[in-house]
Image (spheres, helix red, strand yellow):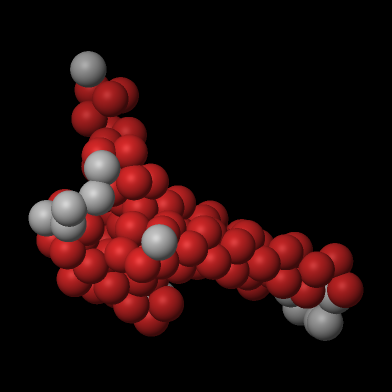
Amino acid sequence: MTKLIGALLNSLRGLMVTWKNEWAFRVEVIASVLIAPFVVFSQADKVSKLFVLFSFALVLMTELLNTAIEKANDVHQKNPDALIKFSKDAASGAVFIALCLAGLSILNLFFL
């Protein structure tokens, strides 16, 4: 049980430190919180609503992973390195894909 509580505290600490230090994460959380009530109370079917909410979660998860990759690479980057740039760009690309999915899911919910 102690390990489970420790893991939970680590996860919450990760969310808090990312909230504090990453502007993009804050924007994505705030946007998700502001849009969620419209999604929940929309007239759409449950599957469409879940798709939107899951896509928001995916955006937040990819942003957290992107931040982790960037910070881990920053520790090792003393000089410009093509592989570090590649890994940061790829992680950023993952966030972009998740954001596109979230945008499409919102369009689907409200306009299609």
Residue 41 in view: yes
Q: In which quarter of the image is the N terminus?
A: top left
Indicate the position of residue 12 as horizontal and vertical percent values.
26, 49
Asked whether, in this view, residue 70 is left or right of residue 17, the answer is right
Picture residue at 24% right of the left edge, 72% below the top:
30
| Residue 97 sits in quarter | bottom right
Residue 61 in view: no
Picture residue at 36% right of the left edge, 67% below the top:
111
Q: Is 19 rendered above or below residue 68?
A: below
Indicate the position of residue 68 as horizontal and vertical percent values.
54, 59
> Most extreme residue toward the front, as rendered?
112
Q: In which quarter of the image is the C terminus?
A: bottom left
Picture residue at 30% right of the left edge, 24% below the top:
3
Name the one closer to the observer, 45 or 93: 45
Name the one closer to the observer, 45 or 9: 45
Asked whether, in this view, residue 112 is left or right of residue 36, the answer is right
Asked whether, in this view, residue 95 is left or right of residue 53, the answer is right
